[in-house]
Amino acid sequence: MTRDFSASFREIARLLDDSRRTLFITGAGISADSGLPTYRGIGGLYENQSTEEGLAIEDALSGAMLARRPEITWKYLAQIEANCQRAGPNPAHLAIARLERELPYVMVLTQNIDALHRAAGSQNVIEIHGDVHRLLCLACGAEETVATLTGRPLPPVCPQCGGRMRPQVVLFGEMLPEAALGRFLEALEIGFDLVFSIGTTSVFPYIAHPVLKAIHQGIPTVEINPGHTALSAHVTHQLPLGAATALTGILKFREPKS
């Protein structure tokens, strides 16, 4: 028998309408309805297997590998970027962008490097892991934003000095960007009165922390994830659904805007 989530949708819609500062934390699961597979997990790009070189994808996409054998890191970044090219924002991205326009304050903290939140129209986005389309020259510091990596030499070559470029993304084993992290911590210090965790397993402490902080402060929390996570038993509302299904359902119960 199909479970009816109408009561949860209605209550979460009410929380949204009452919220002054709303935080959406998103991971790879929110882009699943855009046709973007996760790295791991059911249907993931590298589900239960190593890369062609016999490496775990976490090793192939690490800062250490980029320094030692950049062609390997760029090979798999290009695979991920090629999947991004075939995808566009889905109803979940569009719902969050709409809520940003309609609510007093909405911030998105995303782990994703696919830029789909911005493509959907969200403005107040912190891409804590960067954007695969942004490149940085390691020789001269020049920056470049590319529409696609297709047709580019890998590793990419700087158009200004011919030096080697790196992706402006956080690879495994690397530090988070100070500016993006600082901006988020400032917002977190001011506080939020409603926190969503969508499509993320929350394994990174900096992703789980805002949700745990809200739970400890008695602030409403919503987790949208088909699977069970370490946070599932503790949030106010847990919706075991895909992001697009859940957010579309919630928006249907919001009060119409005049």
Image: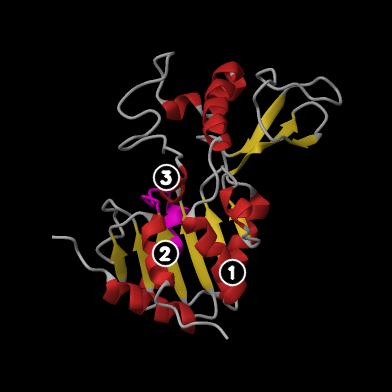
Q: Quadrant of residue 236?
A: bottom left
Please identify the residue farthest to the right as the structure is shown: 160
* Amino acid at pointer 1: Glu
Q: Where is residue 43 in the image (x, y as percent from the top left)?
A: 33, 35
The local secondary structure at tag 2 comes to helix
Residue 78 locus on image (x, y percent): 57, 26
Image check: 123 left or right of 128? right
Tell which tag, 3 or 2, sits nearer the viewer. Answer: 2
Indicate yes or no whether the magenta region holds residue 205. Answer: yes
**Side of 35 where 163 appears, left or right:** right
Q: In this view, does 247 lie to the left or right of 155?
A: left
* Residue at 34%, 79% in the rendered image: 11
Query: Does the CB distance between marks 3 and 1 fall below 8 Å?
Result: no
In this orientation, which residue lies closer to the viewer: 125 or 68?
Answer: 125
Q: What are the residue bounds of the magenta stretch? A: 199-211
Q: Name the residue under label 1.
A: 100
Q: Percent from the top left, x then y, of residue 141?
A: 80, 34
Q: Is 258 contained in the magenta span?
A: no
Kindly identify which residue carries mark 3: 32
Q: Which mark is residue 248?
A: 2
Structure colour scheme: secondary structure
Q: Is residue 84 above or below residue 217?
A: above
| Residue in view at x 55 percent, y 20 percent | 75
Instruction: Specify few, some or many for label 2: CA neighbours under 10 Å numbering under 14, 14-19, or 20 or more.
Output: some
Split into 4 quadrants, where in the image is the N terminus? bottom left
Q: Which of the two discs, 2 and 1, labels the residue nearer the N terminus?
A: 1
